[in-house]
Image: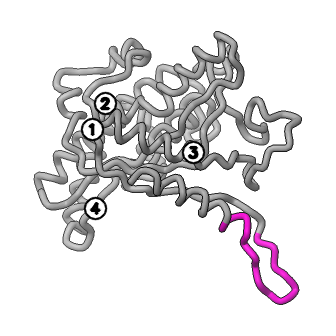
Amino acid sequence: MYHWDLPQSLQDKGGWANRDITNIFSDYSEAIVKNFGDRCNHFITFNEPQVFTIHGYVDGYMAPGYKDLEKYFASIHNVNVAHGKAFQAMKSLNNNIKIGCTFNMAPCIPATKSSEDLHATKLFDTYWNRSFADPMYLGRYPELLIEDVSKHIQQDDMKNIFQKNDFIGLNHYQHIRIKADNKSLLKARGAFNDELPFGLEGKDAKLTLMGWEIVPDAYYDQIMDLKNNYGNPDIYLTENGAAYPDLIEKNGEINDTDRIDYFKKIFKCCKKIY
């Protein structure tokens, strides 16, 4: 239902940092069910909320381009509240539909064994993997985040956020190598833009066209994290893949061997789950 396409008129009023958006999103969700509930049985409230909040409110890489921690922490809570309110509004109209949220999740590993990178990894794992999954599916904020969002929590917020979600959507591509960085507002980050994954500089690592690592075991680990730590939910694998150049041979064929090999490794790891 939401894939980073906020109307400018709402952004002008503060976007996801403005609590009013929680009720607006709930009204929007009702309109979605009224118009499409007879044809669609499954609804995802948000796609990758950690992506549009971190990159939109922390490093300014995506819209709305802010670098503001207060707006970031407000946006985390407002997205969580919006999900909970939307869930209840949609179910009140059609209790047979299935509703969940989709997260871009990845195991976080330290770039080095230094105490600074180890602590940074815990921080980034909290912001990237837990800031939405924990409140939505466990009913609480992670310990490292609660102090920062507490000023935004109002009466009944946690009750509204914590609903009986029908599934979790998982977008996954690789693990994330984390290093401490005092220049980052979060004091921790992964590789950015054209940077190689930290720790792979000067090594002959096989990466995708986007500079991402090929680590099928990380997919397995992430699925098992959801299974073991979030109540063994129904998990929909909503995004995965690898970017490679499409080289057209003289005979007009594209021998997509790298991508085929990638998916063979992915399917092999997924098979271990069952």
Q: Residue at x 38, y 55 (%)?
A: 236
Mark 2 residue crowding within 10 angstroms, few (<14) / some (14–19) / many (20+):
many
Q: Is there a contact, CB below 8 Å, between mark 1 and mark 3?
A: no
Q: Which residue is mark 1?
A: 231
Q: Classify mark 2: helix, strand or loop.
A: helix
Q: Residue at x 38, y 16 (%)?
A: 143
Q: Residue at x 22, y 47 (%)?
A: 87
Choose the circle earlier in sequence order: 4 or 1: 4
Q: Whole-Å distance between the Cαs marked 4 and 1? A: 20 Å
Q: Which residue is mark 3?
A: 217
Q: Position of residue 104 (x, y in %)?
A: 49, 44
Q: Which residues are magenta?
A: 246-260
Identify residue type, mark 3.
Answer: Asp
Residue 13 at least partly seen: no
Choose the circle earlier in sequence order: 2 or 3: 2
Q: Is there a contact, CB below 8 Å, between mark 1 and mark 2?
A: no
Residue occupying the far bottom of the picture:
251
Q: Is residue 168 above or below residue 146?
A: below
Q: Is residue 258 magenta?
A: yes
